[in-house]
Image (cartoon, coloured by chain):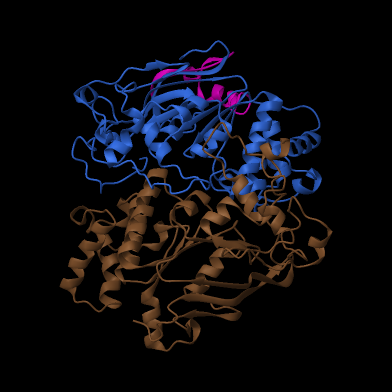
Amino acid sequence: MDTSATGLLDVRDLSVAVRSRRGPIGLVDRVSLSIGRGEIVGLVGESGCGKSMTAAAIGRLFPTTAARITGGEVMLEGTGDLTNLSDRQFRKIRGARIGMIFQDPSTYLDPLMTIGRQVGEALQAHGYEGSREDRVAELLAMMGLPDAAQLSTRYPHELSGGQRQRVLIAAALAGEPDLLIADEPSTALDVTVQAEILVLLRELRDDLGLSILMITHDLGVVAQMCDRVYVMYAGRVVEERDVYEIFKDPRHPYTLGLLAGTLSPEVRDQELFAIPGRVPDPRAMPEGCRFHPRCPLAVQECREKEPPKQPLGEGFSACWKYDDPRLPRAWQLAEEHVLPVGFEGIPATSDDEVSEP
Amino acid sequence: MSADQADDRLVAEDVYRSFKVTSKGRKAVLTAVNGVSLSISPSETVALVGESGSGKSTLGRMMLGLDQPTEGRVLYQGRDVNALDRAQWRDFRREVQVIFQDTGSSLNPRRSIGDSVEMPLLYNLGLDRREARARVADLLDTVGLPPDTFINRSPLELSGGQRQRVSIARAMASEPRFIVADEAVSALDVSVRAQVLKVMKEIQHSRQLSYLFITHDLGVVRAIADRVVVMYLGEIVESGPASIVLEQPSHPYTRSLLAAAPRPDPTMRTLARAQVKGEIPSPIEPPLGCRFHTRCPIARDVCATTVPAAVDFGDGSLAACHFADEVRSGAGPWTAEERSA
């Protein structure tokens, strides 16, 4: 499951730590994930679970003074281990093999530069030799932005949020990368525009065979977009499954909790469900399974030993209780006080996410 | 509490709000809200939905008395909120509270959580310091923040979910009757969002509060709203009980919004392109006829020329579309499935 024959990207046991005055703080702990050609893979979890940090490590988006990879490898087909490359060597990979887009496109576009120049610069960076103007027009059209001649002369602030995200995708794909890392690409957009951007990404996969790593907290986006899903909690992957399987038969209490908290416009009388407790502070991660303080099924074993990856189809669940018959109803049973919540007496009043240092 | 118990509602009566702007070097008038009527009853939760640029936040600000309508009136307990005397205005400011999305900027970073929640108790309710302190502890407890841990902290030390709960506690401190929540839970993670919504619902039950929930998240709307009001380019295009509007939408815009919401079900891959064309037009020169016709998947000739009247379905719902009956019956090219069928 860690290696795939058609794997384009193969991340093995990747660990990342940020520097702090009191020594390194581990944010990503031995994460393994693979992405095949033409595959859309989701990486989900709440804020502070390490999903963006994982993506940033793959794309080397942080300065080595702030964080560093403390273990593992990032194998890219045809290139080898990216963690061994110098920054200079890595710059050739970025854009040419791996493109990236983010939640807020305006942060990544230069406000003083026309759209045409920005996309043109991306082409130049990859040594494009043909007519740059024509290629810019082609790229913009591909992103559903017709009338490139006119658009090219405009500045980012003259565009809508949806148009800016399309321009950013055009620039990210200028070097014809094989892999696109999309970190919450549609979160800040109106729902109608979000739908268009998601459909565009799906079409780019279908037409160009692009592989996409979708980082999102929205399980709706996962259900609509992804082939496979990795769920992260407290720096670790806790479940990896085919998208149909994970929605039908989730096998990790954390995944179940996330699904139970998802609200649908169509569904009547929905419970407002929240997993009690909070994501642990990375400086004080729980022993054993990191989810055990919030888990209604936790037993002694969970508190002491890290759960192994229990194989399930093509994926796995890292849970000691992955085949416990009470698992599908664990959260209901906890709400009915049949099962305890909060082994370590975490009060229902404590809180949520921890900001990434 | 009110002089006129018969009308204990917060009401917008045919309100307009225009702004003078400069567009492409010329002076122009931008009408953000174009003749909207809306009323919220005690204990009711109304959700106001629409894309950015639909005028929903401007309407919210007018309901709060933070902005004055260019035309029309906002009434609270039968009185025009823009013609209140000082004492009445004080009561109104106390009884109608707001929670904004961005708690990073709506809480004073130099003041502790306890002080932020205490202010309205001292100034709005006129409690003395000792009473106020005790009440602060109760309020923090109500929103699930243990007072011992949080009362002396700065907002900077809190997570987004925690800050949002402080905002709720502060709004609650004034013992309001109405709360306008402008994208109050939009920035929160799924499970934190549920916690905050739960708290808001519990408080509503114990205090007969009314909410005007301004949001773009239709899942949240389904979970909390009694009634839904859909706005497009400054006008209400559809309104009615939440179950009807979300299950049998009668306006193409509402249907488009619903079709665009990504369903958390991989066996229903309904997300498809061109449910609505393009993006919301400028409110400076809104389209003639039906304002939605330029993006509508079922627009016909009449839509470009004639403003549609609201169709009343007799079940509490209204839709301003020439073909509302057709849309409600389920016709139209909204989802991938429907189109391939």
Taking the image as shown, residue B250 lies to the left or right of residue B140, namely right
Residue at x-position 27% and y-position 32%: A23
- Is residue A86 one of those drawn in magenta? yes
Q: Quadrant of residue A8?
A: top right
Q: Please name the color used to draw chain B.
A: brown
User: In the image shown, does A8 or A42 lie closer to the viewer?
Assistant: A42
Residue at x-position 59% and y-position 58%: B50
> Does the image show residue A125?
no
Chain assigned blue: A
Q: Position of residue B51 (x, y in %)?
A: 60, 56
For residue A308, above or below residue A275: above
For residue B83, above or below residue A160: below
Q: Position of residue A45 (x, y in %)?
A: 42, 35
Q: Quadrant of residue A280?
A: top left
Seen as rendered, the residue at the extreme right is: B301
Q: Position of residue B9 (x, y in %)?
A: 45, 76
Q: How many marks?
A: 0
Q: Position of residue B17 (x, y in %)?
A: 61, 74
Seen as rendered, the residue at the extreme bottom is: B85
Query: What's drawn in magenta, residue-wise?
Result: A70-98
User: In the image shown, does A29 or A343 lie closer to the viewer?
Assistant: A343
Taking the image as shown, residue A186 lies to the left or right of residue B195, namely right
User: In the image shown, does A286 or A99 lie closer to the viewer?
Assistant: A286
Seen as rendered, the residue at the extreme front is: B314
For residue A235, above or below residue B143: above
Q: Quadrant of the C terminus of chain A?
A: top left
- Is residue A73 one of those drawn in magenta? yes
Seen as rendered, the residue at the extreme top is: A5
> Does the image show residue B321?
yes
Q: Quadrant of residue B28?
A: bottom right
Taking the image as shown, residue A29 lies to the left or right of residue A199, namely left
